Image: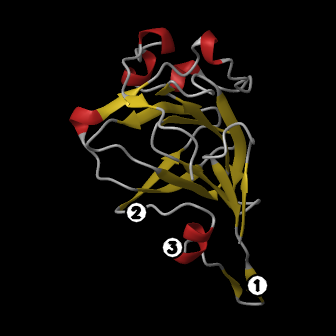
Amino acid sequence: MEIRTLDPSMPEVKVATLKKHGDARGFFSETYTHRGFAAAGIDDTFVQDNHALSATKGTVRGLHFQTAPFAQAKLVRCTRGAILDVAVDIRVGSPTYGKHVAAVISAELWNQIYIPIGFAHGLVTLEPDTEVLYKVSNYYSPENDKGLLWNDPALGIDWPALANPELLSGKDKIQPKLADLPAYFTYEGPAR
C-alpha cells in the first residue's frame, strides 16, 4: 500500500493506493490495516462501514460532515465505478479554511481517500452504477448530521459538467453556504 498527501498545503487529506494480488482465480487485496495507516499518521479507530450505490452517472452526494461529539473521519473507496471525491477544510482559523482538494477514486485505480474530522466531504459519480464503501470513526447521529452547499461559489470546486443538481437529495439542495456555516470545528495547528 502506498499512502500519499494530495496537496502539501492540506497534508491531513491522504490517498492510499492498494495492492492487488491476482491469478487465474481473481485477486486478493488487503483494503485496510490499522498498522499500515497508523504508520502514515492515520490512527483513527473505525467503528462503522457504509455502502452506497448511485445508479446514475453525475449523482452528487454532499458536502457532508458530523459535528462533535459524533464527528467522523472517513476512509472512502469504490468497488465499482468511479467518483470525483472532494474534501473541504471547515476548521475555523485554518490556513486552508474554505479550500478543497479533490481526487478521482475508482475501482480501476483501486485507491481510497482519507477525510479527517474538520473537513466536509462530497462526491460526484463519474460512471453509472457506482458503489462507494466507506469506513467512519464514529456512529451516525441524525442530530449531528450537517452539510455545506456543494456548489457554493466561495469554495471554487470545479465540479465536472456531468454533476447533475437534479439528482441531489432534498437536504443537499438547501445546505448553507460557507459564509453562513457556524464554527463547528477549530483549527488546532499542524499535525505533529
- Mark 1 to mark 2 CA distance (whole Å): 27 Å
Residue at image coords 48%, 9%? 179
Q: Which mark is residue 42?
A: none
Distance CA(mark 2)–CA(mark 3) = 9 Å
Residue 105: x %, y % from top left: 69, 50
Residue denoted by label 2:
46
Image height of 110 relative to 105, above or below: below
What residue is drawn where x is 52% and y is 26%?
Answer: 167
Q: Residue at x 64, y 25 (%)?
A: 99
Characterize the local packing of mark 2: few (<14), some (14-19) or many (20 or more) Cα atoms within 10 angstroms: some
Question: Nearest the camera: 147 or 91?
Answer: 91
Q: Amino acid at mark 2?
A: Phe
Mark 2 and mark 3 lie on one chain; the one further toward the N terminus is: 3
Quarter of the figure with residue 20: bottom right
Q: Position of residue 17 (x, y in %)?
A: 72, 64
Kind of residue at disc 1: Gly
**Residue at x 56% of width, y 48% of height:** 191
Residue 188 left/right relative to 55 = left
Q: CA distance from mark 3 to mark 1?
A: 23 Å
24 or 11, which is in the foreground?
A: 11
Q: Which mark is residue 34?
A: 3
Q: In the rendered view, does 21 fall on the left or right side of 73?
A: right
Residue 90 in the image: above or below residue 189: above
Residue 46: horizontal and vertical position, in percent?
40, 63
Q: Depth check: give the residue in front, 168 or 29.
A: 29
